[in-house]
C-alpha cells in the first residue's frame, strides 16, 4: 500500500506498532514544530550505537498551523528546502511526526473472545474517546500486553484526522521529498528516551516536550508507553506575557525571555513574569499527573525530563523540581550518540531542543 492509503505504514517505526517490515534506509528525522523545523541524520556505528551525521534548524513564522493542520505550507516548504541545502543532509527520504488535539493516543483494556471480536471492540472503544467522527480519521491499533484475565487484553490505539495527515503529505510533495512514515511526537520522544537513557523497567518517567505553542506530556514505565496528553501552552506564553507587561515588541520580549536585558526593565521584574507563566504551566502539568494517577495503578513518578525550546527558560526546571518534588533535568538527546564536537560545537546546548527529531532519526536508522 502507498503512504497515502496505509495508516499502518505511517506508524511502522513505532516498535509497538510495527505492522510492516522496515526497509533498510537511513532517512532524515524531521520535526515540524509550530515555530521551527528541525532535522537530524544519524548513521549506525558499532555496538548498536549511532553517530550524528548532520542536523539542521530553520525558524518558521507564526500562523503556519491551525487546529493541528498546516494552513500556510509555503514557509514550511521553504524551510525544508533550506535545511536540505546542507550537503550532509542530502536525502529524499523523510520521517516526521504529528501531535495536538487532532491526534488521539490511548491504551485501553478490552474484553475479547477472538480476533474478529477484538477489531470490533477496539473500534467501539475508540469511538468513545474520539471528539470527532471515526470516519474522519485514520485509525489503527496494536495489542501490547495480556492481562491477568485471560479474556482481557491491553490495546494501544492511535487515531489522526485525515485532513491533518493530508496537510503533511502535501507539504512534502511540494518539497519534493519522500515521506516514508508519519509518526506521533510522543512515540518519537519515547524512542529517544529509551535509546539514550536505558531506563529501569520499574521507574516511571514524565517526558515533557515544551514547544512554542504546546506541551506534550508523555508518561512511560521503563520503555512501556503509559499515557500522553497535549496541552495548549508553551514557550510562546512567556513571550506574550513579557510583551504585554512591559509594552514591548515581540522581538524585544523574546530577547528578554532568552536572558538578554533591555533598558528600563530589571532582571527581577522579568523573572517575576517568567515565574508567573511557569506556575500556569505547572498547574496544567499537575492536572495531567493527577488525571493519570486517578486512571491508572501508578502512584509515583520518579523523574521528569524536559525537552523542547522552552527547556532553557530560566527557573523552569527548578520550579518543576520544587512543585512536584520530582528530580527534573533537561533531556539529553545525544547522551549515547557519538558527536564530533569540533564539527558541531553548539550541539550540547541544543540537545534538549532536538529530542523529537533525534527520536525520529533513531527510528529511521533501524534496519
Image (cartoon, rainbow, N blue to C red):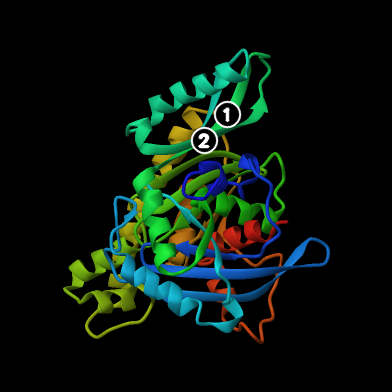
Report, in whole angstroms, how far the alpha carbon at label 1 lies from the one at label 2. 10 Å
Which numbered dot is residue 140? 2
Q: Position of residue 297 (x, y in %)?
A: 57, 27
* Mark in the foreground, 1 or 2: 2
Looking at the image, residue 110 lies above or below residue 131: above
> Does residue 26 appear to the left or right of 235 in the view shown?
right
> Does residue 337 appear to the left or right of 305 in the view shown?
right
In this view of the protein, which residue sits in the foreground, 147 or 263? 147
Numbered disc total: 2
The residue at the point 51 percent across, 42 percent down is 7
Element carrying mark 2: strand
Q: Is residue 111 visible?
A: no
- Count residues near mark 1 (Cα–Cα under 10 Å), then give few for <14, some for 14-19, many for 20+: some
Q: Position of residue 89 (x, y in %)?
A: 58, 76
Q: Position of residue 335 (x, y in %)?
A: 67, 65
**The N terminus is located in which quarter?**
top right
The residue at the point 72 percent across, 45 percent down is 200
Q: Residue furthest front?
A: 1
Which numbered dot is residue 29? none
Element carrying mark 1: strand
Name the residue carrying label 1.
Answer: 155
Amino acid at each position: 500500500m502507498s503512504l497515502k492509503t496505509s495508516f499502518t505504514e505511517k506508524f511502522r517505526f513505532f516498535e509497538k506498532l510495527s505492522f510492516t517490515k522496515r526497509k533498510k534506509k537511513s532517512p532524515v528525522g524531521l520535526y515540524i514544530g509550530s515555530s521551527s523545523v528541525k532535522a537530524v541524520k544519524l548513521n549506525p556505528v558499532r555496538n548498536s550505537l549511532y553517530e550524528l551525521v548532520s542536523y539542521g534548524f530553520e525558524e518558521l513564522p507564526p500562523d503556519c498551523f491551525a487546529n493541528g493542520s498546516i494552513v500556510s505550507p509555503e514557509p514550511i516548504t521553504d524551510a525544508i528546502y533550506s535545511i536540505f541545502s546542507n550537503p550532509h543532509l542530502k536525502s529524499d527520504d523523510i520521517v516526521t511526526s504529528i501531535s495536538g488535539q487532532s491526534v488521539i493516543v490511548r491504551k485501553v483494556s478490552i474484553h475479547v473472545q477472538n480476533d474478529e471480536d477484538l477489531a470490533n471492540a477496539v473500534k467501539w472503544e475508540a469511538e468513545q474517546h474520539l471528539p470527532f467522527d471515526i470516519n474522519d480519521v485514520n485509525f489503527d491499533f496494536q495489542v501490547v500486553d495480556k492481562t491477568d484475565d485471560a479474556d482481557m487484553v491491553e490495546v494501544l490505539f492511535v487515531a489522526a484526522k485525515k485532513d491533518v495527515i493530508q496537510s503533511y503529505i502535501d507539504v512534502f510533495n511540494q518539497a519534493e521529498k519522500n515521506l516514508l512514515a508519519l509518526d506521533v511526537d510522543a512515540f518519537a520522544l519515547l524512542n529517544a528516551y529509551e535509546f539514550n537513557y536505558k531506563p529501569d523497567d520499574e521507574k516511571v518517567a514524565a517526558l515533557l516536550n515544551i514547544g512554542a505553542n504546546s506541551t506534550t506530556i508523555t508518561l512511560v514505565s521503563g520503555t512501556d508507553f503509559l499515557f500522553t496528553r497535549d496541552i495548549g501552552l508553551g514557550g510562546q506564553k512567556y513571550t506574550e506575557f513579557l510583551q504585554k507587561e512591559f509594552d514591548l515588541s515581540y522581538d524585544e520580549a523574546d530577547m528578554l525571555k532568552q536572558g538578554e536585558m533591555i533598558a528600563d526593565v530589571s532582571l527581577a521584574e522579568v523573572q517575576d513574569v517568567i515565574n508567573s507563566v511557569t506556575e500556569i504551566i505547572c498547574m496544567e502539568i499537575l492536572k495531567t499527573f493527577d488525571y493519570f494517577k486517578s486512571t491508572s495503578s501508578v502512584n509515583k513518578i520518579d523523574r521528569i525530563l524536559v525537552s523542547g525550546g522552552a527547556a532553557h527558560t530560566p527557573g523552569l526546571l527548578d520550579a518543576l523540581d520544587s512543585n512536584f518534588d520530582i528530580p527534573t533535568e533537561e533531556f539529553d538527546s545525544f547522551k549515547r550518540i557519538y558527536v564530533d564536537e569540533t564539527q558541531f560545537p553548539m550541539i550540547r546546548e541544543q540537545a534538549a531542543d532536538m529530542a523529537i527529531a533525534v527520536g525520529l532519526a533513531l527510528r529511521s536508522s533501524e534496519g
